[in-house]
Amino acid sequence: MSAPVVILSGAEADVQRIYNRLTDYRDGAGDEFLDRLDSIVRLLESFPELGRPRQLGFRRILVPGHVYGVYYQIEAREVMVHAVADLRQDPAWLDKLLRERLE
């Protein structure tokens, strides 16, 4: 199954926030994150079921070399990315974030 990946506005905001934080930390770190995230998106286009099933019907795949996870759902013809989150957060916070993104 091959499916286009759609990054929803909440996830776009997450990516921008992470990029800014990493760029402030070290020059080039934000670009490195974007490159690795892009490789995940390309993988999901070809292998949407690659991520492990998680709560609320989401799947999660890790961004290599980072503490971030991509939360997505497989729709009939698309892969919808709802959030990119720091996995060091309180699990209750992550659950709340994902519930909000479904609304």
Image (tube, rainbow, N blue to C red):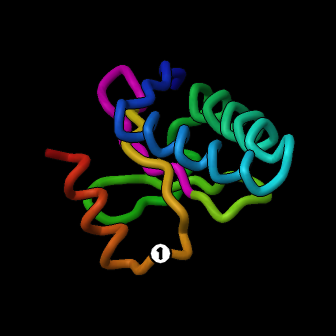
Front residue of 48/84: it is 84
**Residue to which mark 1 is pinned:** 89
Residue lying furthest front in this view?
24
Within 10 angstroms of label 1, few (less than 14), some, or many (20 or more) residues? few
Extent of the magenta region? 69-79
Q: Position of residue 89 (x, y in %)?
A: 47, 75
Please give the name of the residue rendered at 30% of the width and 68% of the height, measured from the top-left corner: 95
For the stretch drawn in magenta, the main secondary structure is strand
Place residue 68 in its image quadrant: bottom right
Please give the name of the residue rendered at 49% of the width and 57% of the height, measured from the top-left corner: 85
Residue 1, placed above or below residue 97: above
As for residue 1 lying within the magenta part, the answer is no
Front residue of 98/72: it is 98
Residue 91, placed above or below residue 33: below
- Give the side of residue 13 with respect to residue 63, left or right: left
Residue 7, placed above or below residue 98: above
Q: Position of residue 91 (x, y in %)?
A: 39, 78
* Circle 1: residue type: Gln
- Give the side of residue 55 with respect to residue 1, left or right: left
> Of helix, strand and loop, which one carries label 1?
loop
Q: Position of residue 40 (x, y in %)?
A: 66, 39
